[in-house]
C-alpha cells in the first residue's frame, strides 16, 4: 500500500455534520416548528399584529386534519366526506367533558379520542367491507347526522353553540378569549410537528407501502398477504384520529363551537386542500391548506366581491380544484419543483449566453 | 371442551413455530450483517492509523523538496487560478476588440482601436507578471544546498518505510483480532440458531400428534402424497349457470415445472384464482403441503393468508405498485414476513429498522440474481414490459415460496424476451428449489420448459402427461385445431 497525501485538509467538520443532518427528513419539520414558535415569541412583543398571528392557529389545526386526510386519500385511495363531522365531534366532546362533566382538559382530550375512535371503528367496519365510494356516502350521512345532533341536542347547546367563557387550562397553558396572544398556539405547533413526524414514519414504513399497494392494485395487495380490511380500516382510523385531534385543538383554541361550522363545506375544503397541495406530499398539503384556509382570512377578506358574497370563497376553491386537476394532477407542490427546474435551466442558459458574448463562441 | 382446547393449542403452537422459523431465518442473515459491520470497523481503524502518521510524514516530505519544487508545491494551484483569470480577461479584450472593429468602417478608427487594445493587453501582461512575483516572494527565500536536500530525502524515505512497516504490523495484529472476533460472533449466532432449532423441533414434536388427530379426515383421503405438493381433486367452479371448471383433478409434483394449457376461455385462470382463493370454488378439494411440511386444505384460508402457506402468484397483466420504486415493490412482496407492528412503524424502533435492512439485503440479492439490480431505484412506469414481467417474478421470490404460480408469463413478450424468461424460470426452479405451476399460450415455451403438462378444454381435463405425449394426443389436437 502506498501512503498518499492530499494537499487540502478537511476543514469545518461541524459544517459537514450540519449539512448531513439537513438532509434528514425530520430537519425541515423541526425547522418549521422552530420558525412558527419564534413567530409568536417575537410577535407577541408587539412587532406583529395579533390579527395576523391569530389567523395561524385555525389554519394549523386544519393542517393537522388535512394530514390525516392525506394518508386516507393519497395513500389508501379512499375518500371520506365526514371529516367535519369528526372534527365537530371532537370539539363538542372536549367542551362537554370539560364544562359539564367536570373532567380536566387533558383527561377530556384522551376520553374524546377513545370515544371517537370507537365510533370510527364502527363506521369503518360497516362501510369498508364493500368496495367503491361507499365510505364517502356513509361518512357523508354520518356527518349530516352529527350536524343535526349538534343543532338539536341540549348537550351541545343547540343552535346557540357551546361557549367556554371561563377559559380552559390545557397542558400548562391557559386559553382565554381575553388574551390577545393565545399561548395554546404553542401546543398546536407542537402537536403539528409530532403528527407530521408520525405521518412521515408511517408513509415510509411497510404500513405506508401496504396503503399504496391497496390503492394501486387490490389483487396484487391480496396476493402479497395484505389484508384489505385491516389496512383500509387503519387508514380510516388514522384520518379519524387526526380529524378529532384537529377539532379538539380548535375548540381549546377558540373556546366556541357552532353547529354550522361543521358542515359539508369544511369537509370539502379539507379535500380541496389535499388535492390542490398534492395528494402524496406533506409539504404540498401545507401549501394547499394555506391556499384554502389562509387565503380566505388574509387576502380574500379584503376584496369587496368576497365581502358582499360571504360564501364566494367556495367558488374560488372549486375553480382551483378544477385548474389543478386539469393541468397539475400532482398538485401545487409539483409546480414548485417544476419552477425550480425552470429557474435553474434559465440561469444556466443565461450564463452561457453571457460567456459567449464576453469571451467568444468556443468557451 | 377438550377439542376446543386442542385446536387452541394447535393455533398457539403454529404461531410459535412460524415465529421461531422466522427468527432462525433472521439469525442466518445476521452473520453477514455482523461481518459487514466488523469489516467496516476494521477499515476505519486502519484509516485512523494512516491518519496518525500523516502530519509528520507530510512535514518531512515537504522538507525534502528541491527549491523549485518547494515553490511549485506552495503556489501551483494559486498560479493556475491567476493565469486562468488573466486568460479570460485577455479573451474578453480580444472579443470586444473584434466587435468594435465590425461596427466601424473608417481605417483611422480601426487603427486607434487596435492600438488601444494592444496597450491594454500589455498592461494586463505586466499586471500578471507583478502578481506572480508577489505570489512567489515568500517562498523564494528558501535556499537549501544539495547535501542538505539529500539528507532530508533520506530521512523522509526512512520515515516512510518505518511508517509502512508499523502499519503492516498494526494491520496484521488487528486482522488477527478481527478474525477472532468474527469467529466468536459467528459461533454465538450459531449457538443461538441451534438453540432455536432445538426449541423448534420440540414444538413440532408437540404439534404433530394434535395435527394428526385433527386432520384425520384430510389425511385419510390422501393416498399418495409423497412426492406431490399440490393436489386438486374434483374442482368445480360455477358462475351462475356457467361451468367454468368442471370436475378437474390433477397432482403437481414437488420440484417440477407444471404447465396448464388450453384454448381461450378454457378456465385456466379460474383454476389459478381458485387455488389462490380469489374465488371460493363451488365444490372440490385442494390439498397443499405447506412450508412447514404440514398438509392443509387451501379452502380454509383467506386470500391474504395463502402467501403465508407458501403459494405466491403473478398476474396476467403486470400488477406492480406503480407509485413505488422497484426495491419498495420487492419489499411489498415480503410484506407477510414483517413481524413488526404498527407501533414499531410509528416509532421506527430498532427491531423494525433491522428487519427492514435484512429484507432489503435479500431483495438486492434476488435482484442481482435476476440481473435486475440496475433498475433498483426506478419506478415501474416506463420500463420495458419484459423487465416488468421479470420484476414481478422476482417479487414472488421474496418469501421463499414452495409453489410459484405464473399466469401467462410470456404474454406480450417478443421472442428474445420469451427466451430470456424461459431461462429465468429454469434458473429460479433450480436455485430457489421451488415448484412452478404456469398457464401459457406460447406453446414453444411450454413444451421447452415444462416437465408435466395438463391440457383442459371448457373446464374439463383432456390429457395429462409429458410434453411429447400431449403433442401427440388426439383430443388435444382436436381442441386446438378443431374436429371434423
Image (cartoon, coloured by chain):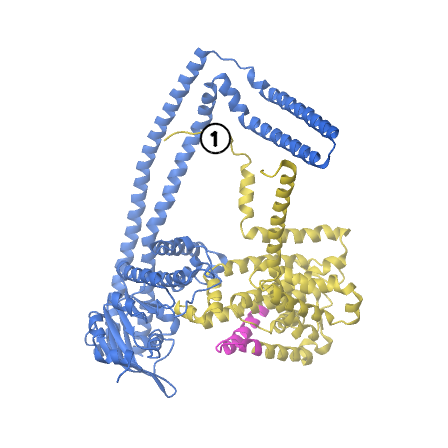
Chain colours: A yellow, B blue
Q: Position of residue B13 (x, y in %)?
A: 31, 67
Q: Position of residue B272 (x, y in %)?
A: 34, 74
Secondary structure, magenta segment, majority class: helix
Magenta region: A111-137
Left/right of residue A228 with respect to residue B113 in the rendered view: left
Q: Is residue B434 above or below residue A157?
A: above
Chain for numbered disc 1:
A
Tell me the quarter of the image containing the C terminus of chain B: bottom left
Among the 4 quarters of the image, the one containing residue A361 = top right
Q: Is residue A191 visible?
A: no
Q: Is residue B94 visible?
A: yes
Q: Is residue A322 above or below residue B155?
A: below
Dot 1: element: loop
Left/right of residue A312 with respect to residue B164 in the rendered view: right
Tell which residue pokes out farthest to the bottom in this image: B241
Q: Is residue A332 above or below residue B167?
A: below
Q: In the rendered structure, does residue B94 fall within the stretch colored magenta?
A: no
* Residue occupying image coordinates x 77% and y 55%: A49
- Work out whether residue B471 or residue A332 is closer to the camera in this orientation and state it: B471
* Residue occupying image coordinates x 39% and y 34%: B46
Q: Position of residue A87 (x, y in %)?
A: 63, 70
Among the 4 quarters of the image, the one containing residue A362 = top right
**Within-10-Å neighbours for mark 1: few <14, some 14–19, many 20+:** few
Residue bearing the label numbered 1: A6
Q: Position of residue A53 (x, y in %)?
A: 73, 57
Number of marks in picture: 1
- Work out whether residue A237 or residue A225 is closer to the camera in this orientation and state it: A225
Tell me the quarter of the image containing the N terminus of chain B: bottom left
* Residue occupying image coordinates x 71% and y 74%: A161
- Work out whether residue B5 or residue A67 is closer to the camera in this orientation and state it: A67
Amino acid at each position: 500500500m502506498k501512503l498518499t497525501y492530499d494537499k487540502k485538509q478537511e476543514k469545518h467538520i461541524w459544517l459537514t455534520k450540519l449539512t448531513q443532518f439537513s438532509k434528514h427528513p425530520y430537519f425541515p419539520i423541526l425547522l418549521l416548528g422552530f420558525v412558527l414558535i419564534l413567530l409568536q415569541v417575537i410577535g407577541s412583543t408587539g412587532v406583529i399584529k395579533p390579527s395576523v398571528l391569530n389567523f395561524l392557529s385555525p389554519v394549523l389545526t386544519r393542517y393537522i386534519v388535512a394530514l390525516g386526510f392525506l394518508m386516507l386519500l393519497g395513500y389508501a385511495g379512499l375518500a371520506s366526506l365526514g371529516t367535519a363531522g369528526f372534527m365537530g365531534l371532537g370539539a363538542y366532546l372536549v367542551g362537554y367533558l370539560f364544562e359539564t362533566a367536570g373532567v380536566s382538559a387533558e383527561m377530556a382530550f384522551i376520553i374524546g379520542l377513545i370515544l371517537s375512535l370507537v365510533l370510527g371503528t364502527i363506521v369503518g367496519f360497516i362501510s369498508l367491507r364493500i368496495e367503491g365510494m361507499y365510505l364517502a356516502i356513509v361518512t357523508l350521512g354520518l356527518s349530516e347526522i352529527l350536524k343535526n345532533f349538534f343543532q338539536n341536542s341540549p348537550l351541545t347547546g343547540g343552535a346557540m353553540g357551546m361557549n367556554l367563557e371561563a377559559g380552559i387550562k390545557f397542558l400548562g397553558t391557559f386559553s382565554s378569549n381575553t388574551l390577545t396572544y393565545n399561548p395554546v398556539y404553542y401546543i398546536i405547533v407542537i402537536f403539528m410537528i409530532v403528527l407530521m413526524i408520525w405521518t412521515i414514519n408511517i408513509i415510509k414504513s411497510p404500513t405506508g407501502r401496504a396503503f399504496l399497494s391497496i390503492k394501486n392494485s387490490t389483487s396484487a395487495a391480496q396476493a402479497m398477504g395484505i389484508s384489505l380490511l385491516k389496512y383500509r380500516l387503519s387508514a380510516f382510523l388514522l384520518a379519524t384520529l387526526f380529524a378529532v385531534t384537529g377539532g379538539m385543538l380548535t375548540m381549546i383554541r377558540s373556546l366556541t363551537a357552532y353547529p354550522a361550522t361543521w358542515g359539508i363545506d369544511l369537509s370539502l375544503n379539507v379535500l380541496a386542500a389535499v388535492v390542490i397541495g398534492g395528494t402524496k406530499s406533506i409539504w404540498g398539503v401545507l401549501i394547499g391548506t394555506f391556499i384554502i384556509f389562509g387565503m380566505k382570512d388574509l387576502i380574500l377578506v379584503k376584496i369587496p366581491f368576497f365581502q358582499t358574497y360571504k360564501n364566494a370563497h367556495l367558488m374560488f376553491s372549486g375553480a382551483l380544484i378544477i385548474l389543478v386537476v386539469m393541468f397539475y394532477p400532482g398538485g401545487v407542490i409539483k409546480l414548485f419543483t417544476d419552477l425550480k427546474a425552470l429557474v435553474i435551466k434559465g440561469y444556466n442558459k443565461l450564463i452561457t449566453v453571457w460567456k459567449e458574448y464576453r469571451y467568444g463562441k468556443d468557451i | 371442551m377438550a377439542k376446543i382446547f386442542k385446536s387452541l393449542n394447535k393455533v398457539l403452537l403454529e404461531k410459535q413455530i412460524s415465529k421461531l422459523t422466522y427468527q432462525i431465518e433472521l439469525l442466518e442473515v445476521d452473520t453477514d450483517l455482523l461481518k459487514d459491520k466488523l469489516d467496516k470497523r476494521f477499515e476505519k481503524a486502519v484509516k485512523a492509523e494512516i491518519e496518525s502518521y500523516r502530519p509528520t510524514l507530510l512535514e518531512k516530505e515537504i522538507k525534502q523538496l528541491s527549491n523549485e519544487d518547494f515553490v511549485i508545491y506552495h503556489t501551483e494551484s494559486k498560479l493556475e487560478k491567476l493565469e486562468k483569470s488573466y486568460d479570460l480577461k485577455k479573451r474578453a479584450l480580444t472579443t470586444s476588440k473584434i466587435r468594435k472593429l465590425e461596427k466601424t468602417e473608417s481605417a483611422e478608427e480601426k487603427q486607434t482601436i487596435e492600438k488601444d487594445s494592444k496597450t491594454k493587453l500589455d498592461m494586463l501582461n505586466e499586471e500578471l507578471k507583478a502578481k506572480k512575483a508577489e505570489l512567489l516572494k515568500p517562498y523564494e527565500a528558501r535556499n537549501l544546498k544539495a547535501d542538505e536536500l539529500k539528507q532530508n530525502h533520506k530521512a523522509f524515505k526512512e520515515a516512510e518505510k518505518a511508517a509502512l512497516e508499523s502499519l503492516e504490523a498494526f494491520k496484521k495484529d488487528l486482522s488477527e483480532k478481527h478474525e477472532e472476533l468474527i469467529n466468536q460472533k459467528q459461533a454465538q449466532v450459531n449457538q443461538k440458531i441451534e438453540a432455536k432449532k432445538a426449541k423448534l423441533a420440540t414444538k413440532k414434536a408437540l404439534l404433530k400428534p394434535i395435527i394428526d388427530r385433527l386432520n384425520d379426515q384430510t389425511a385419510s383421503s390422501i393416498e399418495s402424497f409423497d412426492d406431490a405438493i399440490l393436489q386438486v381433486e374434483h374442482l368445480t367452479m360455477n358462475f351462475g349457470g356457467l361451468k367454468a371448471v368442471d370436475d378437474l383433478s390433477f397432482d403437481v409434483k414437488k420440484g417440477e415445472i407444471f404447465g396448464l394449457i388450453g384454448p381461450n376461455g378454457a378456465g385456466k385462470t379460474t383454476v389459478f384464482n381458485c387455488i389462490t382463493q380469489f374465488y371460493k370454488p363451488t365444490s372440490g378439494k385442494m390439498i397443499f403441503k405447506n412450508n412447514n411440511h404440514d398438509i392443509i386444505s387451501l379452502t380454509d384460508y383467506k386470500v391474504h393468508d395463502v402467501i403465508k402457506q407458501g403459494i405466491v402468484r403473478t398476474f396476467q397483466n403486470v400488477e406492480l405498485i406503480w407509485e413505488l420504486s422497484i426495491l419498495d415493490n420487492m419489499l411489498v412482496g415480503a410484506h407477510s414476513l414483517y413481524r413488526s407492528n404498527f407501533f414499531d412503524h410509528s416509532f421506527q424502533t430498532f427491531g423494525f429498522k433491522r428487519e427492514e435492512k435484512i429484507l432489503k439485503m435479500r431483495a438486492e440479492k434476488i435482484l442481482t440474481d435476476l440481473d435486475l439490480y440496475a433498475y433498483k431505484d426506478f419506478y415501474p412506469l416506463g420500463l420495458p414490459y419484459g423487465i416488468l414481467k421479470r420484476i414481478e417474478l422476482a417479487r414472488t421470490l421474496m418469501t421463499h415460496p414452495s409453489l410459484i404460480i405464473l399466469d401467462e408469463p410470456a404474454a406480450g413478450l417478443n421472442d428474445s424476451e420469451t427466451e430470456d424468461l424461459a431461462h429465468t424460470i429454469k434458473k429460479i426452479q433450480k436455485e430457489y428449489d421451488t415448484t412452478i405451476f404456469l398457464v401459457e399460450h406460447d406453446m414453444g415455451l411450454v413444451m421447452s420448459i415444462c416437465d408435466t403438462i395438463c391440457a383442459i378444454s371448457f373446464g374439463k381435463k383432456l390429457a395429462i402427461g409429458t410434453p411429447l405425449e400431449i403433442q401427440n394426443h388426439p383430443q388435444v389436437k382436436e381442441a386446438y385445431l378443431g374436429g371434423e
